[in-house]
Amino acid sequence: MPELPEVETVRRLLEPDLVGARVKEAWADLERITMPSVGEFIEGMQGRRILEARRHGKQLYFPLDDRRFMLAHLGMTGRLHVERDVEEIIGAPHVHGVLFLSRGRRLVYHDPRTFGFLGIADDTGFLSRMGPDPSLPDFDEESVVACLEGRSVRVKAALLDQRFVAGLGNIYADEVCWQARVHPEQRLGTMSRRRLREVVSFIRPVLERALEAHGATLKSKTYETLFGVGGDYLPDVYERTGEPCNRCGTVIRHGVLSGRSYHFCPRCQRKR
Ligand SMILES: [Zn+2]
């Protein structure tokens, strides 16, 4: 959390204020979440103009006028927003980065759990470590299938692995498994190519639906806390433990895989 639809919603909200803005002053305070370092980030951002607001998977990146890139990742609880530069912001709780922009605006990075990061990069090498983004027109399902086929990893773990597909997290990986009627713990190696292709074919429609809804509304209110307002996507299984399956009425259950919980319908998603 936040995942591709939520990060894209944030990108679209930031774009009008950020594109074309010049950074008059930069500030950051936490080495652990600033790349490569607080000093280099501040120095690198100072005086730069932001040319574009882009995203790949859950990674936000902003081409700058010196051919470098500002990076922002929201991690678990990161929040990035533009506001009017009026009140004192440095020293406010959980604020770990601020860009003071032209036109009296500022970009504020707020992150209570500090799993996200801000950074500056010389090139787009960071993109090569990520799998394809399902929201882009060149997303090729067949190459994802080829990459996953025969692996011993479990289907939910594979969907979460950003090297295979960039952008899914806990919410939408559960949703894809439910749509595809596959148990999250099913191992890829036990699935036929046709079955795997079917699972992969649900990635794009699930994310597109969530994107149209501006992301998810969760019972835990995580989304509201992050962005001030929730999206309109209501998950079919995620965080619905104990409630009836929207397809068959069976009670939704949850399990744990590598320390992360998953939600599933024991009838629609039998382990094979
Ligand atoms: Zn069901």
Image (cartoon, rainbow, N blue to C red):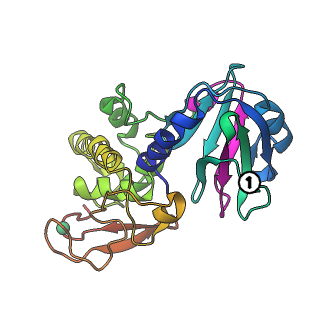
Observer-nearest of 157 and 190: 157
162 lies above or below 68: below
Task: Tell me the quadrant of ligand 1.
Answer: bottom left
The quarter of the image holding the C terminus is bottom left
At 78% from the left and 28% from the top, the residue drawn is 47
Q: Residue at x 70, y 47 (%)?
A: 85
Number of numbered callouts drawn = 1
Q: Examine the image and state in which quarter residue 265 appears.
A: bottom left
36 is higher (above) or lower (below) than 173: above
Q: Which residue lies furthest to the right in this view?
A: 39
User: On the picture, is 176 further left or further right than 6?
Assistant: left
At mark 1, the secondary structure is: strand
The percent coordinates of residue 146 (x first, y second) are 35, 33
Whole-percent x and y of residue 105? 66, 42
Q: State the extent of the magenta-drawn residues as a range.
A: 105-128
The residue sitting at 52% across, 34% down in the picture is 16
Residue 200: quarter of image: top left
Report the residue that reaches farthest toward the left. Answer: 248
The answer to whether 83 appears left or right of 12 in the picture is: right
Instruction: For ligand 1, tell me if the residue under mark 1 lies within 8 Å.
Output: no
* Residue tagged 1: 96
Disc 1 residue crowd, few under 14, some 14–19, many 20+, Cα 10 Å: many
Q: Is residue 121 magenta?
A: yes
Horizontal placement of 89 versus 185: left or right?
Answer: right
Image coordinates for residue 9, horizontal then vertical, percent:
44, 45
In magenta stretch: residue 49: no
Task: Decide if residue 163 is in sight here.
Answer: no
Residue occupying image coordinates x 77% and y 56% = 88
Question: Does any portion of residue 266 appear in the rendered image?
Answer: yes
Q: Which amino acid does label 1 sit on?
A: His
> Percent from the top left, x then y, of residue 248?
13, 69
